[in-house]
Amino acid sequence: MVRSKFPEINLIPSTRNLGFSAANNLAIRSGQAPYVLALNPDTRLLPGTLDYLLELMESRPAVGITGCRLEREDGTFDHAARRSFPTPLGALGHFTGIGRRNGARARLSQYRAPLVKRGPVDAVNGAFMLVRRKALEEVGLFDEGYWMYMEDLDLCYRFKQAGWTTWYEPDVMAVHSKGASAGKFRNSRLNYAFHYGMLRFYKKHYARTRSPIFNIVVYAGIGLKLVVSLIASPIRRLVNT
């Protein structure tokens, strides 16, 4: 379909699912443009968004990554559009749902970066991520150790460590049909990938600065959450079928 309807597109077919990081890196390496747009297949780009953000990055050379406002198909805000880097307490608040409630304390809701309205933020969502190629060449591409999930956080973290700014811009937007790619309920492979991504991010960026006992508690918590998710997902699928 792509070849027949969009012959001007440079299509790179693959015989297997490479995952988010490896597939994006394959496309990035094949191009030379000064900017790269990582766009999920379940994300719809609205007119004017890309032009606006390109002008923003041209005027702000310190910005390495830009994200826009993400809305779901029903018009509600996708809070994952802007994020703080995860902490054990913030993750606990997020996954228990306490941090998602209105009026939740900042330390429990920090994963959603509620205090950032516009401007520098820890991370934006890989569903829509405009990246400066110069910064990628300096910092490196997506970490292919992540098959899916957390690779966007990892890239933003490495950019920040290298001195680049990640910018959240709410004046323009894209529509994110969240879950359209992975499905409403994650299968076992995606569940494993999600929790492995959490583990990899923690071990890569946090573990060396924490005590061994604290690390064991975190690893056990991630493992327990994986077990619960593997049990709960098929049950939810059956109930909602």
Image: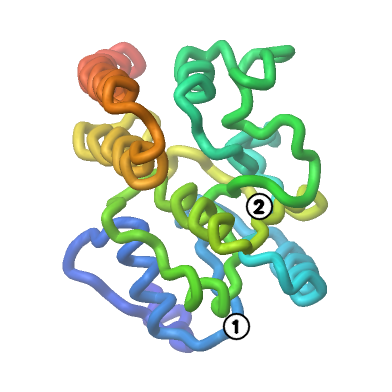
How crowded is the residue under tag 2: few (<14 C-alpha within 10 Å), some, or many (20+)?
many
Which label sits in the foreground, 2 or 1?
1
Q: Residue at x 47, y 24 (%)?
A: 91
Tell which of 160 and 12 is nearer to you.
160
Q: Up-down: is 40 above or below 57?
A: above
SS class, disc 2: strand
Tell which of 238 and 155 is nearer to you.
155
Q: Up-down: is 100 above or below 45?
A: above
Q: CA distance from mark 2 to mark 1?
A: 21 Å
Image coordinates for residue 152, horizontal then vertical, percent: 47, 52
**Residue corresponding to mark 1:** 34
Q: Quadrant of the C terminus?
A: top left
Image coordinates for residue 50, horizontal then vertical, percent: 70, 67
Q: Residue at x 53, y 42 (%)?
A: 177
Q: Residue at x 48, y 78 (%)?
A: 137
- Is residue 125 something that shows in the picture? yes
Report the side of 35 relative to 181 (left or right). Answer: right
Q: Up-down: is 117 above or below 90?
A: below
Q: Quadrant of residue 76?
A: top right
**Residue corresponding to mark 2:** 174
- The residue most toward the left is 15
Tell which of 40 and 164 is nearer to you.
164
How crowded is the residue under tag 1: few (<14 C-alpha within 10 Å), some, or many (20+)?
few
Q: Residue at x 78, y 70 (%)?
A: 60
Going by the numbered disc 2, the residue's amino acid type is Ala
